[in-house]
Image (cartoon, grey):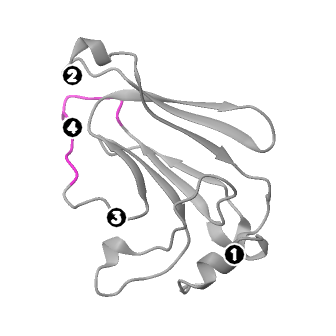
Amino acid sequence: LFYQHGVDFYIAGHEHDYERMYDVAPRYDAATPWLSGATTRSTVDPPATTYIVTGSAGNIEDHESFSRPAPSRSAKRLNTYGWSKMTVYNASHILWQQIQTDTGAPSSTWGQVMDEAWIVQQHHGPFPNHPRRFEIDKMGLAGL
């Protein structure tokens, strides 16, 4: 649905960690479902939705470690508390940052930007019409 309608970002919380993914288009991997999705690992004119889980504000349950190695779609994973900042510069440029606030980490890291990415999208609209779709098509789409 996100791919078909050209949703640029999907931002969610809940987990007690942080993960920014690259563009992820639908592609099911039956042998290893947790590795499903096709990505160009792009932040400039990505031809699919960029996913971010920013659930690292903290609570009494502490951190939840990642249980599997990072898949290729993963750009950055952090297991520290922090907050996210999105700065929209114009219709095509967004600066995304993750700032550390974890008192369990060295105090020298408090307030530091732990992840930063410029997301540049010049081609808004449904991803099936995106000029870079051919890169995703080579990987094979499923569920469209």
Q: Which residue: 40% across, 20% down?
A: 112
Tell me the residue that label 1 is attached to: 133
Q: Earlier in the sequence, mark 2 or mark 4?
A: 4
Left or right, residue 112 beside residue 144: left
What amino acid is at disc 3?
Answer: Pro
Residue at left offset 51%, top offset 32%: 97
Residue at disc 2, secondary structure: loop
Q: Residue at x 81, y 42 (%)?
A: 91
Label 2, label 1: how far apart the Cα atoms are: 41 Å
Residue 36 image point, x, y percent: 40, 75
Q: CA distance from mark 3 to mark 2?
A: 25 Å
**Region of the chain picked out in magenta, as a range:** 56-66
**Disc 1 to disc 3, how far (Cα)?**
21 Å
Q: Quadrant of residue 47?
A: bottom right
Residue at image mark 2: 105
Query: In this rendering, would 86 be left or right of 63?
Result: right
Q: In the rendered image, which quarter contains the C terminus?
A: bottom right
| Of the image marks 1 and 3, the number of the one nearer the N terminus | 3
User: Which residue lies under the disc numbered 4?
Assistant: 63
Q: Position of residue 76 (x, y in %)?
A: 39, 46
Residue 68 image offset from top left, x and y in percent: 21, 61
Query: Which residue is identified by label 3?
Result: 71
Q: Is residue 130 magenta?
A: no
Of marks 3 and 4, the one in the foreground:
3
